[in-house]
Image: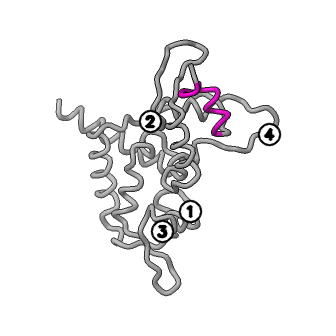
Amino acid sequence: MGKEYMSGSELRQYLHISTRKMKYLMDYNYIPHQNTGQTTHKYLILRTDAEEFKHRMEHDEKLIDELSGHFSSHCKGKEREKPSPKIMLEPTEENLKAFKEYITYLWEDIPDAVSSYEAAELIGMTHQKINRLVKSGILNGANIMNKQYCSKQEIIEYICHPSKISIPVNKVLEKLVRNFMKIYKSKSKRKL
């Protein structure tokens, strides 16, 4: 293997993450790697790619936000492996476009600027989380009379990210995806 590469196990130790999180990162290609097809030492990762990802993991707010919600760093007792989350909706270009159109239509009566409280209600997060997304630059916001406002369009873009529709991180997003899938399937059947 040499020092130029590290195995999945070495990567896991290097990043201080669980086996489940390491497997998720590999399955969703967050880190470039080779799949050897073997049971042990299944993954080969360039050391430079691992170092670059570790830097991103510590400093990239967008990446931190994207990965939050899928894992919990606090486990009581022995860490238990859970099955990989099931993909609800394949994040194909067609699905992403259709989902965006669905949400835009669904929220057409909502003002173009919404408070962080309203945004949080729309997508099932706390207003503090929305404010953190604004502070980190993931969403743009404006303070008006001590109230944080966000663009409805940016919130739509945020929830139409492939990771948000494939594996929704909360019940509100899950419900939006489920309702979309029901409508989309019925429209597809009518076209046939």
Q: Which residue is tagged 2?
A: 88
Q: Is residue 6 above or below residue 103?
A: above
The residue carrying pointer 4 sits among few (fewer than 14), some (14 to 19) or many (20 or more) residues within 10 Å by Cα, namely few
Q: Is residue 129 visible?
A: yes
The dot on residue 129 is 1
- In the image as oriented, which residue stretches furthest toward the bottom? 145
The dot on residue 118 is 3
SS for dot 3: helix
Question: Which residue does the image show at 41% across and 55% down from the upper left?
Answer: 158
Q: Which residue is tagged 4?
A: 76
Query: What amino acid is at disc 3?
Result: Glu
Q: How many marks on residues?
A: 4
Disc 4 or 3, which lies upstream in sequence? 4
Residue 10 in magenta?
yes
| Marks 2/4: CA–CA distance | 28 Å
Question: Which contiguous range is marked in magenta?
Answer: 3-15
